[in-house]
Image (tube, helix red, strand yellow):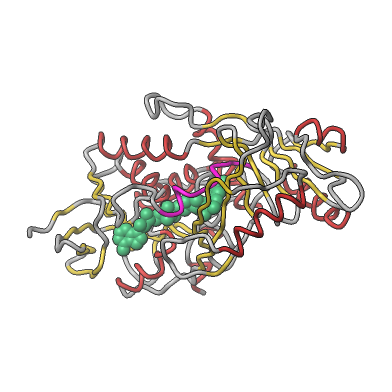
Amino acid sequence: MAMQCADFLVIGGGIAGLSAAARLTLSGNVTVIEAETALGYHSSGRSATFCHYGIGNATVRGLTSFSRAFFQEPPAGFSDYPLAKSKSALFIATEAMLPTLAELATSMRRFTDTISEVDEAGMLELVPVLRTGQDAIIAGVVDSSGLKLDTDALMQGYARIVRRGGGTIINGQRVGGIHRSDGLWQVTTADGSSHAAPILVNAAGAWADQLAALAGVRPLGLEPKRRTMIVIDPPAGMAVNDWPFTKTATDDFYMLPDSGRLMASPVDEVPSEPCDAQPEEYDLALAAWQAEQYTTLPVVRIAHRWAGLRSFVADRVPTAGFAPDAPGFFWLAGQGGYGIQTAPAMAAISAALITGGDWPKELTALGVTPAKILPDRLLG
Ligand SMILES: Cc1cc2nc3c(=O)[nH]c(=O)nc-3n(C[C@H](O)[C@H](O)[C@H](O)COP(=O)(O)OP(=O)(O)OC[C@H]3O[C@@H](n4cnc5c(N)ncnc54)[C@H](O)[C@@H]3O)c2cc1C
């Protein structure tokens, strides 16, 4: 089979690969190769689809802050549906969690003026089923700037830009071989076809280190961690859609409404190999137990369940940049638990670094500098 040549090869059709590919379409011919038949089959299709300042460190908050404008005002024609709907985030604390709640509020206030404290009565107004009082939730902080995202619309929008820009998205083809010769990265896929480009973007999610190994590139030390979600029915007649995203300050439980039901997670982080993650009985039981601890909801039945991988490097900050040990090999990995809400920023960074453009000034102003994002920081 003849080798197909492009300017940029993007391996991975999740949010990271598609968002970067859409930006690169402006600068050349892009080919995206995705192992699964559906885009976003792995982490990107399994997220809670929420965007807020209560997660990650200052660099992640900076990336989130930059990305919000895209969600709220995407380019004309990007999507027929809104990408984001306003939804507050409520962070809750028992007495033991109070110092953590205070630290969280301080960290969030550096990025937004939408943070306010809420007392027990106020919390119950927002989420009437919260278990409040002695030995339960006694304090809360609300971030009114939270956004419920439509990840599907986001990914379809990026994919459309790639296709309209003359790019190609190949589904159902796993890249199984990579080598560099004559200044080109050449990859072969399961059906024996070959693709080549001077620049290869490694956006393979949990598999990013394995993909690097195929190319003989030093790994970043990526650690995929499994997270479990359950969906439960509220009692008949209880309207939950206006409830905020609600999370404990110490990160052991969150829930949020989804089409009249409630999604909940025990905020588990179980080390895993890269795989098609499936929920384990223990984590499902933990999710139900935590829901009953922090709320007065009886969990009679788990209506849906799933799990996905959140992949982190050592400092838990997403990485973008050329591998110091391999010309033209570009890392876009380690999006952790915030790969959707940081995608527009990471795509802008990737496009700037790959095409020799300037680092976005707005990101520098938000404290997101190359030293915090480039892979060099991890490789010593
Ligand atoms: C339960 C859960 C809740 C989450 N909630 C949120 C949230 O509320 N907000 C948020 O911002 N983030 C959230 N996240 C995190 C977010 O989903 C991830 O950070 C993001 O999806 C990572 O995107 P990705 O493109 O890097 O990975 P993926 O979506 O996994 O994409 C990588 C792709 O690469 C492909 N691939 C791998 N190897 C090869 C190969 N050799 N050849 C071809 N293709 C290959 C895979 O098939 C895969 O489709 C959550 C994650 C989970 C699991």
Residue 246 part of the magenta segment: no
Look at the image and give the residue range highlighted in magenta.
42-52
Residue furthest right in the image: 134
Q: x%, y% of residue 194?
A: 16, 61
When asked about the image quadrant of residue 243, the answer is top right
When asked about the image quadrant of residue 125, the answer is top right
Q: Is residue 256 left or right of residue 248?
A: left
Residue 50 part of the magenta segment: yes
Q: Is residue 8 left or right of residue 239?
A: left
Q: x%, y% of residue 166?
A: 21, 38
Quadrant of ligand 1: it is: bottom left
Residue 200 can be seen, yes or no: no
Residue 330 can be seen, yes or no: yes
Q: Quadrant of the N terminus?
A: bottom left
User: Of 225 and 285, which appears nearest the observer?
Assistant: 285
| Number of marks present in the image shown | 0
Q: x%, y% of residue 332?
A: 42, 57
User: Of 133 and 304, which appears nearest the observer?
Assistant: 304
Q: Is residue 274 left or right of residue 300?
A: left
Residue furthest left in the image: 1
The relative height of residue 323 versus residue 152 in the rendered view (above or below) is below
Q: x%, y% of residue 9?
A: 27, 54
Residue at position x 42%, y 65% in the image: 275
The relative height of residue 83 versus residue 302 in the rendered view (above or below) is above
The relative height of residue 91 versus residue 157 in the rendered view (above or below) is below
